[in-house]
Image (cartoon, rainbow, N blue to C red):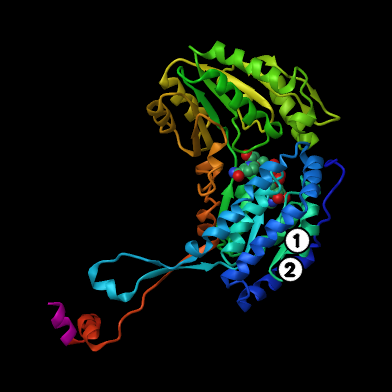
Amino acid sequence: MSDTFQVTPWPLEAIPDVIQQLNATFKSGKTLSTEWRKQQLRNVWKMVNENEDAFREALTKDIGKPLVQTQVLELTLIKDCLDNLDKWLEKESVAVPSPFENWSPTIHRRPKGACLIIGAWNYPITLTLLPFIGLVASGNTGIIKPSELAPHTATLLATLFPKYLDTTCFAIVNGDKTVVQALLEQPFGHVVYTGSAGVGREIMRAAAQHLTPVTLELGGQNAVVVTADAKIELTATRIAWSKFAIAGQTCFAPNHVIVHEKVYDAFVDELKKTYQSYYQGKPEWKSVGKIVNNAHWERIMSLLSSSKGQIILGGKGNKDERFIEPTVVIDIDENDSTVETEIFGPILPVIKYSTIGDVERLLQKLSPDALALYVFTENLEEANKIISLSSTGTASINDCMAQIAPTSLPFGGVGKSGFGSYRGRASIETFSHKQSITTVPTVPEFEALMGWRYPYAESMETVK
Ligand code: NAD
C-alpha cells in the first residue's frame, strides 16, 4: 500500500549532473528536428500501450480505482499532437503596418531548453505525461518529478522511461519535496507544477531566483449550479459520477452543488436513486477508489464530522482500507465546514438557493477563481449569465469535467487556481518561446527612406 511502499529518491548530489547532461544535449541540437520529436512521442504512446496492465496495477495500488481507460484515453492527445505538430510549429507571418510589410515579420517557435514537470498524485500518469507531450513536441529536454504519494506509478515510470525514451534528453527524477527543492536550485527553461496552492507559491518563489517561467495547475472549490429548469434525473446522474470518481480526488470535480429551491427536493430524490443504482446500497473501495493516505483520510473525515448538514447518503469511513463512502450532505449553510475549503474527497454538500443574487454571492464567497464551474439548465442564456458571475479557469454546461474531452481546448486555472495552460496547441505555447524575427531590406532605396534616423543634419532635414 502507498503508506508503506515508497519511491527510491534520487541522490540530491546527482541532480546538478543530470541537468547539465540535459542542457548539453539541448545545446547539441538533437531535439530540434520535428521527426525526432515525433519519434519520441510515438515512444511515449508505445510505452503506455505496451505496459497498460502494469500501469493499471500501479494505479490500483496507489489510489485504488484505476480509471486506466481515462488516463490512456487522455493520451490520445499524443495522436492529436502528431497530426498537428507540423502546423503548430510553422512560423507565423504577421500583418503589420505598410512601411514594414517587406521586412518579412515572422514569429518562430523556439524550445526553451531543459524543462521540469512536477506532478501530483491523483492522476499520476496524465498529470505528468500530458504536459510531457508538449515538452517533447516543442523540442525541449526535460525532467518529470512524479508525486511520491503515488509511489507505484512513479516507480513504474522511472523503470520504463529509459527503455522507451532517449535518456540523454529525458529523465524521471523521483523523491519528495527535498528533491523538488534541489531541482529548483538549478535554472530551467520552464516549470509546470500541479498540486496545492501553498506549494505552488513555494515553487514560484524558488523559480524566481533564476527567473524561470512557471505554469501553476492548482485547485479550488468548484461549484455546480442546478437551475429550476434543469433535467434533474440526468443532472443527478452526471454530478454523482463526476464527484465520486476516484473518491472525489479530481481537481476539477464538483466541490459542492447549489440547487434552486424549486427542484431541490427532486434533485435529492434523484441523487438517492442514482446512488442505489451505482453502488446497489453497498459502496466499497473497489468501485469508488481509496483516499490517497491516512492524513488525507483523517482530514476529510474531520470535515464531515464538523458539518452541521444532514447526511442522507454514505457518511462512514474505514481507515484500514483508506475508504470513505460516497457521501451526500444536504441543508448546507454557506459557513459549513464542508464548503470552507476544497474537500478533495467523496463528500457532496448540497446548498439551496432562491435567487440569482444568492448564486452570485455563493460563487464569490465559496469559489473565487475556482478551476471549474458547472451549470445544469435548459436555458443557455441563464447558463452564460451564471458563468459570467465569477471568474473560473474552465466551465461546462450540463455536464461536469466535460471540458477536457475536446483535446484542442486548453486546460488551466485563473487567479488562485493557477495560471498558464496545456493540452493541444496550448502545450506548444507553454513549452516554447515566441521569437519575433524581421529581415530588413538592404537596398539603397530603403536606406534612403530610413535615413532620417541617423544623427546628422541631412536626415533631420528629412524629418522636417
Ligand atoms: P502532491 O502532494 O502530490 O504534491 C504535488 C507535487 O509537489 C509533488 O510532486 C510533491 O513532491 C511536490 N511538493 C509537495 N510539497 C512540496 C514542497 N513543500 N516544496 C516543493 N515541492 C513540494 O499534491 P497535492 O498538493 O496533495 O495535490 C492536491 C492539490 O492539487 C489539490 O488542491 C488539487 O485540486 C490540485 N490539483 C490540481 C490539478 C490541476 O490540473 N489544476 C490537478 C490535480 C491536482
At mark 1, the secondary structure is helix
At mark 2, the secondary structure is loop
Q: Which residues are magenta?
A: 458-464
Is residue 356 shown above or below 166?
Answer: above
x, y percent for residue 226: 50, 22
Residue 380 lies within the magenta run: no
Q: Is residue 447 left or right of residue 362?
A: left
Ligand 1 within 8 Å, label 2 CB: no
Residue type, mark 2 in image: Thr
x, y percent for residue 461: 13, 82
Q: What residue does disc 2 label?
A: 167
Screen quadrant of the N terminus: top right
Q: What residue does disc 1 label?
A: 161
x, y percent for residue 374: 51, 31
Which residue is located at x 76 percent, y 54 percent? 50
Residue type, mark 1 in image: Phe
Q: What secondary structure do most residues of the magenta stretch adopt?
A: helix
Which residue is located at x 49 percent, y 28 percent? 375
